[in-house]
Amino acid sequence: MQKYHGIWTALITPFNENQQVDYEALRKIIRHQVKAGVTGLVPCGTTGESPTLSLEEKKKIISFTQEELKSTDVGIIAGTGSNSTLESIELSKWASDQGVQAVLVVTPYYNKPSQSGLIQHFEAIANAVDCDVILYNVPCRTAVSLSIESIIHLAKHPNINAIKEASADMALIEHLAINLKEKNLNLQILSGDDATFYPSMKAGSTGVISVTSNLVPQKMVELYSAAQSNKRNQAEEIHNQLTPLFNDLFIESNPTPIKTAMANAGWCLNNVRLPLAPLEPSNLERLNQTLSEVLQ
């Protein structure tokens, strides 16, 4: 059984003119996501600007998202990871006690731990919670990467049930999927890269934690459904249509481009927290052109 499949939106955190969380904007975004038919939402991840959210802000955003989803069948995976194991345990345990489906725990950034340190970090968190733990491998932002051997080791833990693999490495996903199958381990692989999400499904992933689905959730749901139903022509058509958007939403560090696109669409103000900054003029022009072409 695939507990983690389909489209999970890595929610942006909208900010008002005073750089405080805009909960009315967040409510509208969440309700639009539910209406579009996404499988689940992921508040307080990288796309939610988690490094610049306080612990109390993270708790409030997670609780707010839960409240909005309580009468739906849309799941919630709470972003609770940091480069501090103790801090990650504290927030993960709190989220688990609140009843989230799972916590998303990133590989510690800046510290650059060894594989042994990574294993001990994730096991300490998994031992502290009663919900599922989803590993988050994103080496381009953390400077470390879980090896296949480490992932296989961690997959044996009863609370570790999925991995968000955001390296965009198709060979890694394919080899990981083969290794998991050979060892009869039921760790699901969620893509963490929109541009390679469709190809990754062929390699063994079961879904995606998506940035793009903030803006076009229904299109992403259609892409997943077509791929899942082996409607290859339809899936490739949607993938090709969205590819310029996939690429340009990472023209600068996420979530600056998606915040810009969401502001253009009227969902929120175009505010990110320092040290992120607004798009450079040339990149803004390019993104606006792509938005006009893809969303026409």
Image: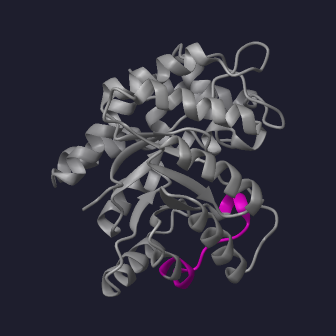
Q: Is residue 73 left or right of residue 129?
A: left
Quadrant of image for the C terminus: top left
| Residue 108 sits in quarter | bottom right
Q: In which quarter of the image is residue 84?
A: bottom right
Q: Is residue 295 something one can see in this rendering?
A: no
Q: Can residue 73 be seen in this view?
A: yes
* In the displayed structure image, the side of residue 179 where residue 119 appears, left or right: right
- How far across and how far down the image is residue 110, in percent? 81, 62
Give percent across and percent down for residue 147.
Answer: 58, 79
**Image position of 58 with respect to 3: above or below:** above
Q: What stretch is highlighted in magenta?
A: 140-152
Which residue is depicted at the point 50% across and 53% down? 193
What colour scheme does the image use?
one colour
Residue 4 falls inside the magenta stretch: no
Quadrant of the image occupied by residue 56:
top right
Locate residue 276 relative to residue 46 in the image: left or right. right
Main SS category, magenta section? helix
Above or below for 72 versus 100: above
Residue 248 x %, y %: 56, 39
- Front residue of 200/136: it is 136
Q: Which residue is drawn at 35% across and 36% down?
A: 74
Relative vertical location of residue 4 with respect to residue 246 in this rendering, above or below? below
